Image: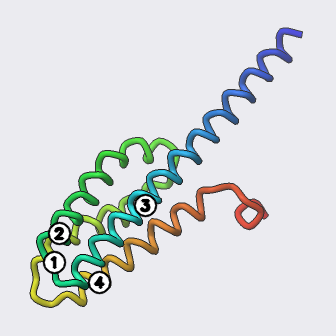
């Protein structure tokens, strides 16, 4: 009987940890997609200062969340997003904005893919 309780407690801890990971992933990806999209919109409206500050905010926010995401996600995906986001402030200062827009779109797609690939649903299970 004690073994059954131990298994039940371990199962409950596993499910709770998984649910918290899903909630955290959704919150972070939503926040990051919004920040990068706002930076792109600012640059589309020729507001370089706002685009730069939002790009820097995206990098800071990502670095703040990165160590937690590393606990339960594939590191190579996280590093790819890190590299993309890190390039945004520098690209924001260039005269050519097409590279900035391209990296914003790339970052948004990577973040969206991270959310889709880590959330358990029928497509990911089967």
Query: How far, Cα to Cα, is label 2 from label 1?
Result: 6 Å
Q: Residue at x 79, y 64 (%)?
A: 126
Q: Position of residue 9 (x, y in %)?
A: 74, 21
Q: Secondary structure at mark 1?
A: loop
Question: Do the residues under discs 2 and 1 have CB atoms within 8 angstroms?
Answer: yes
The circle drawn on residue 101 is 4
Q: Residue at x 36, y 43 (%)?
A: 67
Number of residues whose C-alpha sits closer than 10 Å to that of mark 4, classed few (under 14), some (14–19) or many (20 or more): many
Q: Is 97 placed above or below 12 here? A: below
Q: Nearer the viewer, mark 2 or mark 4?
A: 2
Q: Position of residue 29 (x, y in %)?
A: 46, 58
Q: Nearer the viewer, mark 3 or mark 4?
A: 4
* Mark 3 / mark 4, whichever is N-terminal: 3
Question: Where, quadrant-wise, is the N terminus in this rendering?
Answer: top right
User: What colouring does the structure picture have?
Assistant: rainbow
The circle drawn on residue 115 is none
Q: Is residue 98 left or right of residue 6?
A: left
Q: Secondary structure at mark 4?
A: helix
Query: How far, Cα to Cα, is label 2 from label 3?
Result: 30 Å
Question: Do the residues under discs 1 and 3 have CB atoms within 8 angstroms?
Answer: no
Q: Residue at x 30, y 45 (%)?
A: 64
Q: Which residue is mark 3?
A: 76
The circle drawn on residue 47 is 1
Number of residues whose C-alpha sits closer than 10 Å to that of mark 2, classed few (under 14), some (14–19) or many (20 or more): some
The circle drawn on residue 50 is 2
* Mark 2 / mark 3, whichever is N-terminal: 2
Query: How far, Cα to Cα, is label 1 from label 3?
Result: 33 Å
Q: Residue furthest top?
A: 2
Query: How far, Cα to Cα, is label 2 from label 4?
Result: 15 Å
Residue 79, image quadrant = bottom left
* Mark 1 / mark 4, whichever is N-terminal: 1
């Amino acid at each position: 009987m004690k073994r059954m309780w131990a298994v039940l407690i371990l199962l409950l801890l596993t499910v709770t940890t998984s649910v918290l990971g899903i909630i955290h992933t959704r919150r972070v990806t939503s926040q990051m997609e919004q920040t990068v999209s706002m930076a792109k919109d600012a640059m589309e409206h020729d507001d370089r200062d706002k685009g730069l500050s939002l790009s820097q905010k995206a990098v800071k926010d990502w670095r703040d969340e990165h160590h937690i995401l590393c606990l339960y996600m594939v590191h190579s995906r996280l590093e790819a997003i890190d590299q993309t986001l890190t390039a945004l402030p520098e690209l924001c200062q260039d005269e050519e904005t097409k590279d900035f827009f391209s990296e914003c779109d790339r970052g948004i797609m990577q973040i969206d893919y991270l959310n889709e690939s880590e959330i358990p649903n029928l497509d990911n299970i089967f």
